[in-house]
């Protein structure tokens, strides 16, 4: 039986109501809930940012933590040692990371498939070592990390990440239905064919990579300000790369809203398991993950599109 | 050779190219004139596909010249050559599996800046492949091999080209589709677009072509009008299987 497709107006109304609710959260919710939603939003930006590049171009980025760590470090050091306000430190971190990613992309985005993925892992690990080395202690504080206070209230930080997450989704939505998005998809589907149609594949890949770096970097800066602490093994942790990827797989790779749904469900499941089954947490989590990948290989949104619960369009 | 100098769309002179340090082409020369179908035939490993890739700027030429529409384009980036009017249809029905027919055509047309230009290209493509119209919303992975080859051809035509390079358009197709593909190529030629075709099915390609080149291990071996090559006993014995 076919269900009637969702009405567009209803969808807008639903999004507006959700947004109003999210904006209002700091006025009535406890700090526990504000913190939980803040984490969901940070990981929404990580997952969407990963998806924006990897989901559309098919180049699997296993170095997301590099974006997060580099921007996190730049902004944290600016706040801790150079008395910058978070308001300036965050964008400076994100912009510098984005610029650096253009250089990285220029070199690494010519390498295809698994080699690109491995190179990004190597870059992240290498940078972690660099930030932890004693030779650079004067700048980075070395391996012992940087504790700092940014002087921003939890509610303000929450609204900042809410704004960023909303913008990120809007950008992903716009790109997916744009010519640029279609070019990225063509690269994913067949890069040679894309090139023969006159698409400047390397340039387009670098633009998507740098945009992903900017958004993820900004979220990374907010993340470490929220933690009031940064150190190399935390900032460049493989978990910061893998968790957003798993969230995206969970929600639907290459979809617009998959990463948000993935980040939300994933964080809640994580919370429940952690509270109820802290000893078996990782094994139960792994089992859930395997079941999901076996039975929902296209993620939740992909599955819903296939069943025609949702319209089969790219814009969702 | 002299008589072929006028009305040249494409001229390749002494082209040397290959993959990395492996040289495949040791100085190839050929040309395509206005309104012609030119076939490039020869045994496996002769370098036929390599010629097309080097012309399209996908491989570097270490020596020699490629002149397209009276302008040297040797080692120019692919997007520049495509924007100048070269359409290159790669080997093996290269479609975008998850994209619809409409999206393929949009992709093909994306170098065209004017709306009007795009509509003209679309009109021409639908005239050649009327059945694409009703399958606009179908994804490429729901199509047969022959349909995919046609879609790939249609997409190449959407760039509004001045020259079409086809790499083994018959590869992996049933005899019925092979015939359809060649008939479409004739129609395309009649619409004023010259083609350079690389084909394994040499006899068939020569039958449909105005001119042919036979390559062997990266060098020119024979050339001549399609019929002449077909009737040349040496070519028949060596490359057309008797």
Image (cartoon, grey):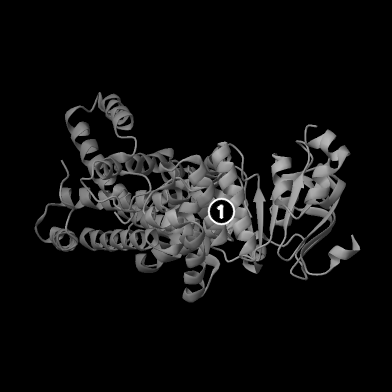
Quarter in which the N terminus of chain A is drawn: top left
* Residue at the (65%, 63%) spot, across then down: B193
Q: Is residue B197 above or below residue B114?
A: above
Q: Position of residue A27 (x, y in %)?
A: 11, 61
Residue B129: % across, % down: 49, 56
Disc 1: host chain: B
Image check: A36 left or right of B209?
Answer: left
Say if B200 sits above or below B165 in the image.
Answer: above
Residue A158, by quadrant, is: bottom left
How many circles with numbers are drawn on the protein?
A: 1
**Residue located beneath label 1 in the image:** B153
At label 1, counting other C-alpha atoms closer than 10 Å, the crowd grade (few under 14, some 14-19, many 20 or more) is: many
Seen from the viewer's position, the closer of residues B154 and A124 is: B154
Report whether residue A279 is seen. yes
At horizontal 22% and vertical 36% (from top left) the residue drawn is A269
Residue extending farthest left: A28
Q: Is residue A290 left or right of residue B42?
A: left
Closest to the observer, B87 or B126:
B126
Q: Point out residue B61 in the picture as x, y percentages from the top left corner.
A: 79, 54
| Residue A104 in sight here | no
Q: Secondary structure at mark 1?
A: helix
**Nearer to us in this view, A120 or B34:** B34
Q: Nearer the viewer, residue B193 or B84?
A: B193
Position of B149 with respect to A289 (left or right) is right
Figure quadrant of the C terminus of chain A: bottom left
Residue A302: horizontal and vertical position, in percent? Answer: 30, 43
Query: In the displayed image of the protein, which residue is found farthest to the right?
Result: B2
């Amino acid at each position: 039986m076919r269900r009637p497709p969702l009405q567009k107006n209803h969808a807008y109304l639903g999004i507006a109501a959700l947004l109003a609710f999210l904006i209002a959260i700091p006025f009535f919710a406890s700090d526990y809930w504000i913190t939980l939603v803040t984490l969901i939003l940070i990981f929404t930006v990580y997952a969407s940012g990963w998806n924006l590049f990897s989901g559309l171009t098919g180049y699997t980025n296993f170095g997301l933590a590099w974006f997060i760590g580099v921007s996190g470090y730049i902004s944290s050091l600016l706040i801790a040692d150079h008395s910058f306000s978070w308001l300036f430190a965050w964008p400076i971190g994100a912009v510098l990371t984005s610029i650096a990613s253009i250089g990285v992309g220029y070199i690494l985005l010519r390498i295809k498939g698994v080699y690109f993925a491995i190179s990004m892992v190597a870059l992240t690990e290498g940078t972690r070592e660099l930030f932890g080395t004693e030779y650079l202690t004067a700048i980075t504080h070395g391996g012992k990390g940087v504790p700092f206070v940014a002087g921003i209230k939890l509610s303000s930080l929450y609204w900042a990440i809410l704004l960023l997450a909303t913008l990120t989704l809007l950008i992903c939505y716009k790109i997916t239905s744009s010519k640029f998005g279609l070019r990225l998809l063509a690269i994913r589907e067949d890069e040679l064919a894309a090139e023969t149609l006159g698409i400047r594949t390397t340039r387009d890949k670098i633009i998507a990579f740098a945009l992903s770096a900017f958004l993820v970097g900004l979220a990374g800066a907010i993340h470490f300000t929220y933690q009031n602490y940064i150190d190399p093994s935390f900032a460049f942790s493989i978990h910061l790369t893998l968790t957003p990827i798993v969230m995206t797989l969970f929600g639907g790779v290459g979809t617009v809203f998959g990463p948000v749904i993935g980040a939300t469900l994933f964080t809640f499941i994580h919370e429940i398991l952690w509270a109820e089954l802290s000893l078996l947490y990782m094994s139960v989590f792994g089992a859930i993950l395997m079941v999901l990948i076996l039975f929902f290989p296209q993620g939740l949104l992909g599955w819903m599109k296939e069943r025609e619960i949702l319209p089969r369009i790219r814009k969702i | 050779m002299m008589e072929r100098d006028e009305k040249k769309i494409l001229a390749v002179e002494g082209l040397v190219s290959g993959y990395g340090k492996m040289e495949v082409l040791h100085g190839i020369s050929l040309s395509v004139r206005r309104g012609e179908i030119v076939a490039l035939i020869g045994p496996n490993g002769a370098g036929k596909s390599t010629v097309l890739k080097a012309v399209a700027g996908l491989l570097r030429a270490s020596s020699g010249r490629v002149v397209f529409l009276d302008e040297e384009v040797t080692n120019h980036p692919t997007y520049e050559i495509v924007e100048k009017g070269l359409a290159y249809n790669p080997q093996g029905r290269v479609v975008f599996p998850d994209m619809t027919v409409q999206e393929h055509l949009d992709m093909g047309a994306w170098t065209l800046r004017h709306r009007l230009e795009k509509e003209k290209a679309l009109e021409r493509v639908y005239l050649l492949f009327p059945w694409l119209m009703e399958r606009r919303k179908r994804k490429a992975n729901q199509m047969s091999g022959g349909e995919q080859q046609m879609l790939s051809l249609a997409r190449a035509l959407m760039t509004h080209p001045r020259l079409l390079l086809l790499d083994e358009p018959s590869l992996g197709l049933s005899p019925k589709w092979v015939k359809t593909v060649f008939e479409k190529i004739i129609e395309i030629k009649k619409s004023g677009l010259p083609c350079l075709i690389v084909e394994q099915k040499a006899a068939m390609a020569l039958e449909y072509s105005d001119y042919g080149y036979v390559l062997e291990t990266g060098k020119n071996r024979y050339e001549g009008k399609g019929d002449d090559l077909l009737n040349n006993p040496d070519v028949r014995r060596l490359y057309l299987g008797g």
